[in-house]
Amino acid sequence: MSNNPLADEVWRAMAAVVIDNRDSWKRAVIERSGLPFSRIRMLKRLSRQSMSVKELAHAATIDAPAATVAVNDLEDRGLVVREIDPTNRRCKIVSLTEDGRATVREIDAITDPAPDALAALDDAELKTLMAILVRVQSLSGR
């Protein structure tokens, strides 16, 4: 994606910090929701916007058949619904149900404290980091 080696290095470092420090939160989310984490990731994506199964597969970096299986599971649990896309009747749009939105709210309510290394930064460093992350999010269209 990037032609900037420094940006790639920063990305890997950010990902490592998150991956290395999220295990307890992930376990808590799985236990509380009763869902595999792959389904939780889909619900979180759908909480931002409804998508076709194909779009959801792309966003979740899985193939379309796996996305269909996951959507079927979420639909069986009453967390999502498929509706015909009014702009393309051959396509179905996946959206959260009220139970799906409640599940996302429950997931979002699970505490996810910062790792000690991040909490050790001073306020000025944290504000700088937050400003950078907000800028990155705005550039990625989220």
Image: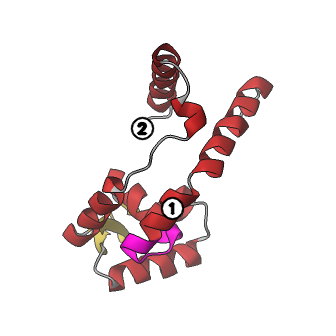
The residue that appears at 29% across and 62% down in the rendered structure is 106
For this orientation, the residue located farthest to the left is: 98
x and y, in percent, of residue 141 in the image? 44, 35
Q: Which mark is residue 86?
A: none
Residue under numbered circle 1: 26
- Vertical comparison of 47 with 83: above or below: above
Nearest to the observer: residue 91 or residue 24: 24
Q: Which residues are magenta?
A: 31-39
Callout 2 crowding tier (Cα within 10 Å): few <14, some 14–19, many ≥20: few
Colouring mode (rainbow / by chain / secondary structure / one colour): secondary structure
x and y, in percent, of residue 72 in the image? 42, 82
For this orientation, the residue located farthest to the bottom is: 76
Note whether residue 122 is visible. Answer: yes
Nearest to the observer: residue 51 or residue 115: 115
Residue under numbered circle 2: 142
For this orientation, the residue located farthest to the right is: 5
Q: Magenta stretch containing residue 134, yes or no?
A: no
x and y, in percent, of residue 1 in the image? 70, 38
Q: Which amino acid type corresponds to the residue marked 2 in the rendered image?
A: Arg
- Vertical comparison of 52 with 68: above or below: above
- Vertical comparison of 138 with 47: above or below: above
The rendered magenta stretch, by its main secondary structure, is classed as helix
Is 107 situated left or right of 39 in this image? Answer: left
Residue 64 quadrant = bottom right
Residue 96 quadrant = bottom left
The residue that appears at 53% across and 59% down in the rendered structure is 24
Q: Which amino acid type corresponds to the residue marked 1 in the rendered image?
A: Lys
Note whether residue 87 is visible. Answer: no
Mark 2–mark 1 CB contact (< 8 Å): no
The residue that appears at 24% across and 65% down in the rendered structure is 102
